[in-house]
């Protein structure tokens, strides 16, 4: 196995994640929110808004963004970056769907300065 390959954990069937919503995966490093768009795209971010730490998993997904339930900051699901004029980043995690089953890597993607 290549050491740069992420270690994948299966978290369950795609249909267990509500469309325009999220499911939380509890890890030793903190909670990870796994989001599902209306188009069945799946993204994973640290379940913590970069603004005041609000639970992104409780926000509403619209397109490829989630709105933090505390102060309505919009976070881009595909980059983890706050949408301007807001600034900040929620760590992104690799996620994949194979044969209707969702898997998650617990190694955050590079590119977010505050994970």
Image: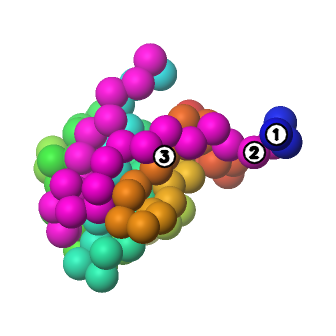
- Pointer 1 and pointer 2: residues touching (CB < 8 Å)? yes
Residue 33 image point, x, y percent:
33, 45
Numbered badge on residue 1 = 1
| Label 1: few (<14), some (14–19) or many (≥20) C-alpha neighbours in 10 Å | few
Queried whether the magenta region covers residue 7, the answer comes back as yes
Horizontal side, residue 3 vs residue 31: left or right? right
Horizontal side, residue 71 vs residue 78: left or right? left
Secondary structure at badge 2 equals loop
Residue 46 image point, x, y percent:
41, 40
Residue occupied by mark 3: 104
Q: Looking at the image, is mark 1 or mark 3 earlier in the sequence?
A: 1
Horizontal side, residue 114 vs residue 68: left or right? right
**Residue 92 seen in the current view:** no
Residue 87 position (above or below residue 5): below
Q: CA distance from mark 1 to mark 2?
A: 7 Å
Residue 2 position (above or below residue 14): above
Residue 39 image point, x, y percent:
30, 82
Residue at image x 44%, y 17%? 28
Q: Mark 1 against mark 2, which lies toward the viewer?
A: 1
Residue occupied by mark 2: 5
Residue 19 position (above or below residue 102): below
Queried whether the magenta region covers residue 80, the answer comes back as no
Residue at image x 47%, y 22%? 29
Hey, which residue is sitting farthest front in the picture?
Answer: 99
């Amino acid at each position: 196995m290549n050491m740069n390959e992420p270690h994948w954990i299966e978290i369950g069937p795609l249909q267990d994640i509500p469309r325009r919503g999220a499911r939380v995966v509890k890890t030793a490093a903190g909670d990870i929110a796994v989001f599902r768009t209306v188009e069945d795209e799946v993204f994973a971010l640290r379940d913590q808004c970069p603004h005041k730490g609000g639970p992104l998993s409780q926000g509403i997904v619209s397109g490829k963004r989630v709105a933090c339930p505390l102060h309505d900051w919009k976070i881009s699901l595909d980059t983890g970056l706050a949408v301007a004029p807001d600034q900040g980043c929620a760590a992104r995690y690799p996620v994949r769907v194979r044969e209707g089953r969702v898997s998650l890597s617990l190694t955050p993607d590079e590119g977010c300065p505050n994970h």
